[in-house]
Image (cartoon, rainbow, N blue to C red):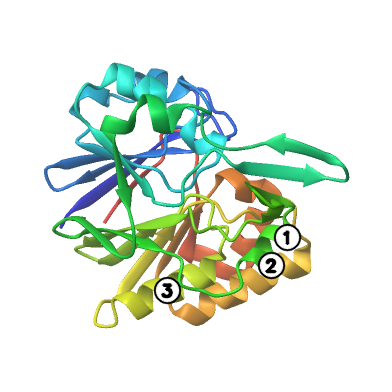
Amino acid sequence: MKTNITVIVDNIKNEFAEGEWGLCLFVEYGDKKILVDAGSSNLFLENMEKLGKDVKEVDFGVLSHAHYDHANGIPAFFEANDHASFYLRETTSNDLYHKKFIFRYYIGIPKHMLRDYAKRLVICSGDYKITDGVYLIPHKTPGLNEIGKRESMYRRTKKGLVPDDFSHEQSLVLDTDKGLVIINSCSHGGAANIINEIKETFPDKHIHAIIGGFHLFNKSEEEIREVAARIKETGIDYVCTGHCTKSRAFGILKEELGDKIDMMKVGFEMEF
């Protein structure tokens, strides 16, 4: 299926549309129009208008994971679009925190979103087919709570804070004319892990691309080059990253991956 993806919100603005710490992508997949995340605010609505995209034409939305910089715009989306549902993982809840020393900071979805918009939310579990060629795939890599601990990301439970295992994170997988395209907006579970998860899920399919942030803004050069090496090993054709990768890490990835990689910014378009 012919596929076009437009970056609506990213950290890097363009000459006529603003950016913010967050991500929103507009996917045109055949006759379907999909919104992936909704950024940190209602900026995505302004940028959609500036980029010539009609929010009322969106058929459904996908929440990549339950952090504020991807979910805060969802209430504004529901006000602007009266019919589309948003798909999210069954473990999504308002329980995510960043912890530093004795301090904790809420980093989750709008506090009452699950209650206030229950009729507009589709709760997914396991491998989930939305429509022909469009899938939502959860993490299948064990031990991701170790990444949560390293990143100081936690979930609130009755027993206190526990390291996030990113079970609320999911990959949108599109079967395109060039092969499978993976969208995972922050790739908290690890970009190479995610590619390999999709390989295992679709063993007979070629994986063409992965799109999303890689959460490398706080990593050392050695760690970034290791991520690039692991991505290379997967044999993937194309990478487009941004948001929580940021410019320093992108420069290092570019040295390693060359023409295989592009950087997102508001208005950037990809065609598959």
Residue 148 position, x and y percent, is 67, 59
* Res 54 seen here: no
Instruction: Point out the image quarter for the N terminus.
Output: bottom left
In three-dimensional space, the C-alpha distance between marks 2 and 3, rounded to whole angstroms, equals 18 Å
Residue 192 position, x and y percent, is 52, 72
What amino acid is at disc 1? Lys
Which residue is depicted at the point 72% across and 43% down? Answer: 98
Residue 146 marker: 2
The residue positioned farthest toward the front in the image shown: 158
**SS class of the residue under badge 1?**
helix
**Mark 3 lies on residue:** 197
Which residue is depicted at the point 64% across and 64% down? Answer: 145
In three-dimensional space, the C-alpha distance between marks 1 and 2, rounded to whole angstroms, equals 5 Å
Q: Nearer the viewer, residue 154 or 15?
A: 154
* Res 187 seen here: yes
| Camera-nearest label, 2 or 3 | 2
**Mark 1 lies on residue:** 149
Q: Are marks 1 and 2 in contact (CB under 8 Å)?
A: yes
Which is more N-terminal, label 3 or label 1?
Answer: 1
Residue 272 in the image: above or below residue 74: below
What amino acid is at disc 3? Glu
Which residue is depicted at the point 58% across and 77% down? Answer: 230
